[in-house]
Image (cartoon, rainbow, N blue to C red):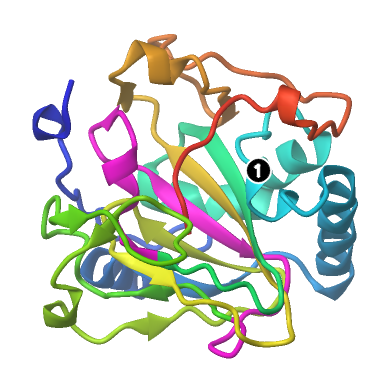
Amino acid sequence: MGLVDLDLSFRATPLHDGKRLSKAEIQLYNREGYVTGLDVFGPTEGAANLRYFDSLLEKRGSEGAYAINCYQARCAGIWDICTNETILDYVEDLIGPNIVCWASHFFCKLPGDPKIVPWHQDASFWHLSPARTVTVWLAIDDVDEENAAMRFIPRTHDLGHLAWREPTGDAALNQELVGTEKLGEPVVNALRAGQVSLHADMLAHGSLANTSHRRRCGLTIRYCPPEVRITDEEWKKGIEAIICRGTDPSGHWQHHARPTGNDVAPENSPRNVGGN
């Protein structure tokens, strides 16, 4: 099934006061395509997340900056973050009580990293329909404009599938949206370590090279309701989902229980998907 056959439309969340998000914040997400600056982990827990990522990076070496991808069902520490109750409350407020985590990815821009993440739409890389994934971006480090925080182009999430080309230069992805200068002013997604943002899977976003002397690391976590379907059998082989909350009566998503180890060896990688 090609992208033209996928449902890539945005479906607004009905307005309500949720477990964590106010009606105004849900309205903001519906209108802008994202909500940000949400507290999850305090300083002590945030420091523990940082130490945990540092330990994974040390195991994987220099390539680990971008390579710790989709290990949520293979690393106990990542599984624990993905099933954090506060994060799930935020996600439930947007997609409902049945929540599937189908991917995760550490994006770590080391000081002086020349790679950009071109403007892109996440769902353009995925074989999922309908497009109902919410991405949680958890700040491991403090992130701001100086160290190449992620940037959003507001209100692009309901424009459908935008045209793209192969990027030129040093890029972390193989798609770059065209004509983004006509889509509005970017917003810098500045976060303190331990905070999260949530964005829709068709929102245009990306990040610049990290020319600073500070690292910029975040964990992306992809959540969807169980009615979303994987449309490509080969792509499906690399998906190791966690049914984080509620149920999947259809059985489409196979649940993976909490693993016991934290092995990020290359041969233990299930697949590579997405980018931020």
Q: In the rendered view, does 213 fall on the left or right side of 225? A: right
**How many residues crowd mark 1 within 10 Å: few (<14), some (14–19), many (20+)?**
many
Considering depth in this image, is 93 or 189 the residue closer to the camera? 189
Please name the residue shown 26% across and 40% down the image. 131
Q: Position of residue 256 (x, y in %)?
A: 65, 19
Residue 260 inside the magenta-drawn segment: no
- Residue designated by label 1: 82
Q: Position of residue 229 (x, y in %)?
A: 31, 22
Considering depth in this image, is 213 or 47 the residue closer to the camera? 213
275 lies above or below 2: below
Q: Position of residue 172 (x, y in %)?
A: 48, 57
Considering depth in this image, is 7 or 25 the residue closer to the camera? 7
Q: Quadrant of the N terminus?
A: top left
Please, what is the three-letter code of the amino acid marked with disc 1? Cys
66 lies above or below 119: above
Residue 119 inside the magenta-drawn segment: yes
Please name the residue shown 84% across and 75% down the image. 43
Number of numbered discs on residues:
1
37 lies above or below 163: below
Quadrant hosting residue 182 = bottom left
Q: Position of residue 273 (x, y in %)?
A: 47, 38
**Residue 132 visible in image:** no
Quadrant hosting residue 178 = bottom left
Please name the residue shown 47% across and 17% down the image. 253
Please name the residue shown 38% across and 72% down the image. 25
110 lies above or below 130: below
**Magenta span covers which residues?**
118-147
**Residue 14 visible in image:** yes
Q: SS for tag 1? A: helix
